[in-house]
Amino acid sequence: MKHTNVKASPFGVALVSWVVACAAVAYEARAFKGVNTTRAAMLALGILGAFAAYLSKQLREMREEAEAAKSRRNELGLELMRTRNKFMHTEESVHVGRAMTPRKSDIFVVTYPKCGTTWMTQICHALRTRGSMDFGEITEVCPWDILAHDCGQDLAADHVAEPRVFKSHEGFETIPKGAKYIYVARDPLDAFFSFYKFLPAYTGLQPDDIDERAFANAIFAGASHSGQIWDHLLGWWQQRHNSNVLFVFYEDLIANLRVEVVRVASFMGLDPNDDALIKLTLERASFAFMSSKEQKHHFDEHFTRTFVLPKMALDPSTPTRVSKVREGGGAVGSRRELPEDVAEQLHRKWADVIAKQTGCASYAALRERHQLGQ
């Protein structure tokens, strides 16, 4: 007969122990026919105490094993995410993007990742083309500066309309100078939560491969090509009064899109009083339009993923599990879903970086300062 070693379940062992203990107490009570009930009770308490200690030890060991497994899963997930993200664009393509010579009329839509890049790019493209949707994917007509070379796009070429529009996540220090820049800022806590939902999925990971705490530590350690959001935001905030910089808050886009579209049109050198153009742009930049079944493929990054996925060692046919325009995405206040300790960690980073330089204790205070024209 073949024997196999099977590890007993802690709860199975505990159950057997409990049955034996109950039998022993019952026997003790019956043997003395109720004469020595004190002895039986003491025996029962002793057995119960030993059982409780054993069960507590087993539960503690199970928790430790689960935590160790979770930690290891996080480590493997983070390492895979870093590795794949590292190969997202080549050094040559990054160099070409940063070294390009822009035209004075060029518009760079600049954000930290997950701060409204696609939304603002669509606004700009709709304004310059009067709402044309004659393109496959938005990045084909509004190239991503440091990825364009890898995608076979010529950064010196004319666009389908004037002014030329480029997507960028560059900080002020590295972006090509001499153009016009629309910077979209977003509450770092909301941006972090959105980035957490996006980047692991973009690099082919499953939803539970990395938790929020591990992701926060990775971003702080420089896992993103765009650096850290606080430095990124601060660098562009310091340029907000330059005539070639339009500083926009994501929350203002949500609160009053028409006002912001008029600001963008004027900044681009277009007629802000062209009501037909503004109305058409508002329709083309609405969530209902961009997320519709007929239009959402224009914003799913299928163009860039064709070139990016093979460099990440992923099959080009790998489906996009997270969309740039998705139900529940882009919400204000999504930070409420963050673990309290992660939110506190993000608040400390704000205090250490932004508050010290601006005197604004919070993102809300920074936004209010901008609204006051300061």
Image (spheres, helix red, strand yellow):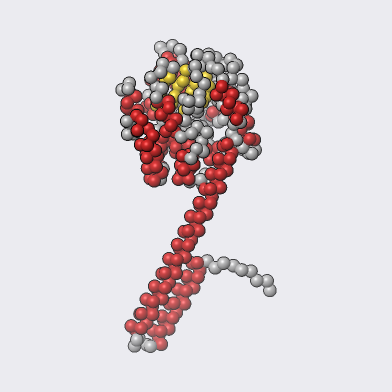
Residue located 32% across and 34% down the image:
361
Quadrant holding the N terminus:
bottom right
- Looking at this view, is 276 or 329 the one in front? 329
Q: Is residue 89 left or right of residue 289?
A: right
Q: Is residue 233 above or below residue 281?
A: below
- In the rendered image, residue 229, in percent from the top left (x then y), is placed at 44, 33
Residue located 41% across and 16% down the image:
243
Q: Quadrant of residue 266?
A: top left
- Looking at this view, is 255 or 48 the one in front? 48
Q: Is residue 113 above or below residue 165?
A: below
Residue located 39% across and 73% down the image:
49
Residue 22 visible from this viewpoint: yes
Q: Is residue 33 above or below residue 259?
A: below
- In the rendered image, residue 348, in percent from the top left (x then y), is placed at 37, 40
Q: Is residue 357 left or right of residue 54?
A: left
- In the rendered image, residue 171, in percent from the top left (x then y), is placed at 48, 27
Residue located 43% across and 66% down the image:
56
Quadrant holding the C terminus:
top left
- In the rendered image, residue 78, in percent from the top left (x then y), is placed at 53, 44
Residue 250 visible from this viewpoint: no
Q: Quadrant of residue 191?
A: top left
